[in-house]
Image (cartoon, rainbow, N blue to C red):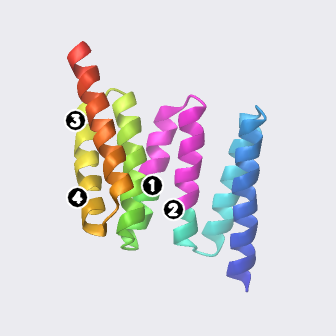
């Protein structure tokens, strides 16, 4: 029962974080995300923690902190990987690869993208594969322009 209540509260806080972000209050959004993670951590709810890291990463990516987004995506993907949730880990790595590319780490992005693609092929996720292929093409175009 406690796990369900803590998860529900954490999910509400994640939604609140997104709402604060959309309303232009990034400080309140970050507080809500942090509190959500505390709720999930208190009950050792690893799947929810992983998702919260990646949701927060999306927020940070869109609100100008790609370094923090990189850390959050990496943490989320690692949590899913530790639970052998391969498809979710791969999607966390899809986000991580995009952030690495934006940060100028082409080799790191390619490495993460390759791992994610292999996992998505194994799990049969054509949408994820297409997104990674699009990322690769964009990265290659950017590299030829510089």
Rendered image quadrant of residue 37: bottom right
User: Which of disc 4 and disc 1 is earlier in sequence?
Assistant: 1
Element assignment for label 4: helix
User: Which of disc 1 and disc 2 is earlier in sequence?
Assistant: 2
The percent position of residue 30, horizontal first and vertical second, equals 68, 43
The residue beneath circle 2 is 50
Gap between marks 4 and 2, in whole Å? 20 Å
Q: Is residue 5 left or right of residue 56?
A: right
The percent position of residue 145, horizontal first and vertical second, equals 25, 14
Residue at the location (76% across, 67% down)?
Answer: 9
Gap between marks 4 and 3, in whole Å? 17 Å
Residue at the location (70% across, 46% down)?
Answer: 18
4 or 3: mark nearer the eye: 4
Label 4 neighbour load within 10 Å: few <14, some 14-19, many 20+: few
2 or 1: mark nearer the eye: 2
Magenta region, residue range: 50-74
Circles 2 and 1, Cβ within 8 Å, touching? The answer is: yes
Q: Is residue 66 magenta?
A: yes
The percent position of residue 71, horizontal first and vertical second, equals 45, 45
Label 3 neighbour load within 10 Å: few <14, some 14-19, many 20+: few
Q: Is residue 72 left or right of residue 101?
A: right
Gap between marks 2 and 1, in whole Å? 7 Å
* Quadrant (top left, top right, bottom left, bottom right) of the N terminus: bottom right
The residue beneath circle 3 is 107
Circles 1 and 4, Cβ within 8 Å, touching? The answer is: no
Above-or-below relation of 56 to 52: above
Q: Which mark is residue 75?
A: 1
The percent position of residue 62, horizontal first and vertical second, equals 57, 34
Gap between marks 2 and 3, in whole Å? 25 Å
């Amino acid at each position: 029962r406690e796990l369900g209540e803590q998860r529900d509260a954490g999910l509400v806080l994640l939604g609140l974080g997104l709402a604060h972000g959309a309303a232009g209050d990034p400080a309140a959004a970050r507080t809500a995300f942090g509190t959500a993670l505390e709720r999930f951590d208190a009950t050792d709810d690893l799947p929810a923690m992983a998702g919260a890291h990646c949701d927060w990463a999306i927020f940070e990516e869109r609100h100008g902190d790609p370094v923090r987004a990189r850390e959050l995506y990496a943490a989320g993907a690692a949590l899913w990987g530790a639970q052998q949730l391969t498809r979710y880990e791969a999607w966390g790595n899809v986000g991580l690869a995009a952030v690495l590319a934006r940060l100028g780490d082409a080799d790191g992005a390619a490495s993460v993208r390759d791992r994610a693609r292999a996992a998505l092929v194994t799990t049969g996720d054509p949408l994820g594969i297409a997104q990674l292929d699009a990322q690769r093409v964009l990265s290659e175009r950017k590299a030829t322009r510089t």
